Image: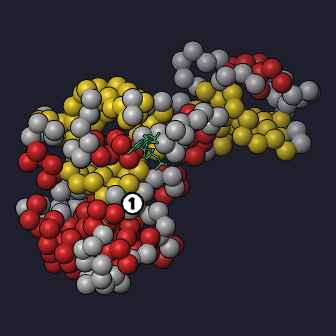
Amino acid sequence: MLTVRNLHKAIDRRPVLKQVEFAVAPGLVAGLIGRNGAGKTTLLKTMAGIIDPDHGTVEYEGQSVHRHPSLKREIVFVPDNPEGWFGYTAWGCADLYAQVYPRFDMAYFKDTMRRFGLPVDRNIRHFSKGMRMMFSTALGLSTKARYVLLDEPTNGVDPIAKKQVLSLLMEAAAEGVSLVISSHLLEELERMTDTILLMKDGAVETHTSEDVAGGRVMKLQVVFAGEAPEMWLEGRHVRVLENIGRVYTLLLNTEPGSAAYEELQGMEPLLMEPLPVKLDDLYVWKLGGETDVG
Ligand SMILES: Nc1ncnc2c1ncn2[C@@H]1O[C@H](COP(=O)(O)OP(=O)(O)OP(=O)(O)O)[C@@H](O)[C@H]1O
């Protein structure tokens, strides 16, 4: 189990992580979502022991990753731009990693590089953006660490290569590797993940797949009988996703304390049809109109 407890981190005196708490169980795939600048990369690097927190702990099987550096072998961070390796060939990087990660699988690395069509003897600096990302993912998974934390693994990767990267990740998950995947591609995450970690205002909310499917938010297509109830539509428990003529697509907060659904029923609309709630609805509900961009 990888457990994050009460994590705080400020960068340039600006708090980026505030009381972050969650756990990722072994073998699970978690998606990390949030606006640009929300702190996803900072969180992943802190979880991997690359950044020291100001307060709080990251525990692998109950032991602090920052106090026991040998545990860092079980948690690998896969950056979206491996600048640190510029100057090395892919082989050179694999050699270095093999010295650090005791279960580094050179045969797997070679095979994956071949599968991705990437040259092993070329300097990483001369790889394209997508090639760097694929290389980074191949190297990270080759460590055979128990937890692989990936920062936008399909960023800049073309559609065909993207399928290959996602297949590779799913194969690793099927073998029991735990993945935390930061991404802005919500449809992709929705298909792959067991849990969603949503970053907002420096904190993390955990949503299971069941939550996303409708526990906290309801999506409805509505046609009102008379004039649209402007005040109700602007209320904090209602969000208008789309309005075409008299047809409204709405998100309603159904968490305790919200009576939005009962209020709508009371208005006796002509049409009130439930629609499936997607991850991007949750994203809009939780993060729409907010700005984390820092
Ligand atoms: N080295 C740094 N120096 C100064 N500020 C930084 C540094 N690294 C991150 N930050 C700031 O910390 C905040 C969080 O950045 P971070 O890269 O973790 O966000 P993110 O959620 O990964 O963003 P994105 O989705 O755009 O990649 C931002 O406000 C960013 O400007």
Mark 1, other Cα within 10 Å: few <14 / some 14–19 / many ≥20: many
Residue 34, image x, y percentages? 49, 42
The image quadrant of residue 163 is bottom left
Q: Is residue 248 left or right of residue 183?
A: right
- Can you see residue 99? yes
Q: Ligand 1, what quadrant?
A: top left
Q: Which residue is outermost to the right? A: 226
Residue 150 to residue 196: above or below: below
Q: Is residue 10 left or right of residue 291?
A: left
* Residue at 20% across, 67% down: 142
Residue 214 to residue 126: above or below: above
Residue denoted by label 1: 80
Q: How many marks?
A: 1
Residue 135, image x, y percentages? 32, 71
Q: Give the position of the N terminus as an image quadrant.
A: top left
Judging depth in this view, the residue of 43 and 166 nearest the camera is 43
Residue 86, image x, y percentages? 30, 69
Residue 226, image x, y percentages? 92, 27
Judging depth in this view, the residue of 236 and 93 nearest the camera is 93
Query: Quick one: SS at disc 1?
Result: loop
Q: Which residue is outermost to the top? A: 257
The answer as to whether callout 1 falls within 8 Å of ligand 1 is yes
- Can you see residue 103? no
Which amino acid, mark 1? Answer: Asp
* Residue at 20% across, 50% down: 75
* Residue at 14% across, 68% down: 96
